[in-house]
Every structure is written in C-alpha cells, then in structure tokens.
Amino acid sequence: MINQATYQLYQILRESSDWLEAVRRFNQIFGLTLNQQEFNDIVAQTLGGYNVLIEDQTPVKPSLKNNYLKLKVELLPACVVGVLSKPLQWVYALNVFWIAFLLCSLVVPMVYFVSDANQIIAQTDYVLYFSLLYATMLVHELGHIGACAKYGLKHGGVGFGFYFIMPVMYADITEVWLVDRSHRVIANLAGIFNEILYASALAVVYLMTGNETCLAVALSVFTMVIWEFNPFVRFDGYWVLSDLTNTPNLLQKANEMFRISIRRVTLMTFWQQPKTQLRKLSWQKIGLFIYGFINTLLWVAIMIYTLIMYREIVFQFPVIVWQLFAKAVNAQLSWQDLSRQYITVLLFYVVFLKFIISQWQSNKHILLKNIRKNYVSEESITENRL
C-alpha cells in the first residue's frame, strides 16, 4: 500500500537507534547528503499525521477521519475513557480474551432456557429497562478503548455521530492499524465482548434477585450483539472481516471492484473469457467482487421492499416533510405527527441520493478522463502535422 522508498524510510527509522544513525543510513541508501533538519522534514512530510511516529507533531491527515460518520461530537475525552476502561484491560490479552469470550457467550442463553419467558414481558420496568439498555453503548465503546490501551496504543475519546441517519456512538482507535492482525481482531471484538459481559452480569443479577427487567435487558443486548456481527454495515463484524482479510477500506474497495467488473464484462462474457484471463483474477479480487455483489444486492432488496411496502409515503414524502417543517415552525408539531415509517422512507431517500451522487461523480470522472484523452490525441496529431 506504500511505495518502495517510503517502506525503506520506515525500515530505516525502525532499525536505527537514534536520529543521527537514521540520517546516515538514509543518505547512504539514497545517495544524498541531507542534514538533520532536512531529514526531519522528509519524515514529517512522508509519515507524519498517520499515527506512525512517536511524538508526531503533524496534524492527523484528513484521510484518517471517519468520513462515513457525520456531525461527530466528542462526549468523553481520552483521559476519562482511559480510566473507565482500565479495570477490564487485562481481559484483552491474547491468552485470556478468547476463553473469556466463549464462556460469557454461554451465560445468557443458559439463563434464558431456565427462566419463564412469559413473565419477562409482564414484569419489565421500562424506565429501568431503557436506562440499562442505553448504558450498553458506553460499555461497548470502552471495550475498544481498553483493548487499545492494553496494547500500548494511543487512543482518542468516545463521541456521538450519525451513520446514514442513525445516531451512533464511536470510539477513536485509529492507531489499531499499528498492531498485528490478531490484536486488531480482538480490539474490534472488544466492544462486543463488553456487551456480552454486561449482559451476562445482568443475567446473573436476575438469578440472584429475580428481577425480570435485568433479564429483558440481557436478552436485548445479546440480540443486538448478533446484529453487530453483520459484515455489510460498518459495525464490528465489518471491521473484523476487514482485519481477517487484511483489507483496509473494505467496503469502498469491494464496491469499486463490483462496479468495474459490471462495466467491463457481463456475466456471460465473463465465463467465456479464456482460462488464461481468468487465472489473472486473484482470490482477493474475486472475494471483493462477491462481497460487493452481496452488499449491492442487499441494499437493492431494502430499496425495493421500502418502495413496495411504503409506496404512498415514498411519493408523498417531500410534501410530508414540508408539512412537518411548517408545524415545527408554528410550534404545532407533536409526537403523534411522527411515524417510524418516516424514518424508513428517509433512509430510502438518503441511499437513493447517495447512489445518484456517486454515479454522477463516477461518470463525471470518466467523462473528464475521455476529454483529456481526446484532447491529448488531437494535440499530438497537430504536433505531428506541424
């Protein structure tokens, strides 16, 4: 993912005992005569801002920001979440984590099978239920922070933002890319582990006190954990798949591979290609194509389902939004005016507009590329004639 010169610079810094030795080796390898300041400037320009250098003074590069999260606001700074995550940091060691993960995963199902499911709904205190349930979001993010701290990585704080139109919490663990694959997987699963541990503790409280609300929250959290393994949305399952395949920006690369493949060949012509052409396709490219295809298929299915089930609301939605806005301005908006169906339709419009914009940008890029190509061709013909 980097060129040879950058890799050599990285190796020089890793293998040198101090800056003087690094400058000497760099000049020897590249045949230069740089002084210390000139070498520092090259290092800062090449590797600065990527959380690779110790005591890095370069601001974080924009490419590292989570562009898929919008309106981000930090709620708890790094120093606070570091202290809150400290009690469980020992669990994220390689020789402890997987055993603890397996054992905790068994607690909630076992308690559920020995409980009376009919009493859970009847005896649930919903004020306590939602209080305990929403605390799970912070517990989840503290898992990611704790794993980073355990591995000696610098971490940021915990904040709030929007993914598509969904409000979510996030943890800044950008430096997790600096550790090996096994540690990255644990860091990305640490949030889910904390949720399972939290649910297990509530299940044990239920066994000790008979409080049905605790079991209801434990079951809800366990159900959410299953959804978080979904690899087609940027939840923990997606990041784990990205780690296992060693593919940063997995979704972006998969969608790009799928679009390129569709443009170049149809399904029939693909299978008619000579075997020598098919051998050139690496397993990574095939995997990216399959992942991109399934991801596209799922979103298309969601769009079609929304269009069929909420057809009238979809076509009337711009008018509905204007009416709600007018009521809000006149201080006449109430909870009865809002509907969960509106959220589904809003997601439909967001996805549809993102698709239109991405297609326009992609086609604009291809059009500009063709214009430049034709311009260069005509220019070269003119020069030849002259």
Image (cartoon, grey):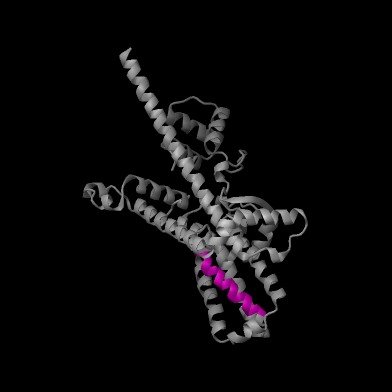
Q: Residue at x 41, y 28 (%)?
A: 372
Residue 283, horizontal then vertical, whole percent: 33, 53
* Residue 220 is covered by the magenta coloring: yes
Quadrant containing the N terminus in the rendered view? top left
Residue 19 occupies quadrant: top right
Q: Furthest residue to the right?
A: 331
Q: Furthest residue to the top?
A: 386
Q: Residue at x 33, y 45 (%)?
A: 264
Residue 87 occupies quadrant: bottom right
Magenta region, residue range = 213-229
Residue nearest the observer in this picture, 187 or 289: 289
Residue 243, horizontal then vertical, whole percent: 46, 56
* Residue 13 is covered by the magenta coloring: no
Residue 214, horizontal then vertical, whole percent: 65, 78
Res. 78 visible in picture: no
Q: Residue at x 50, y 39 (%)?
A: 13
Q: Give the overall secondary structure of the magenta segment.
A: helix
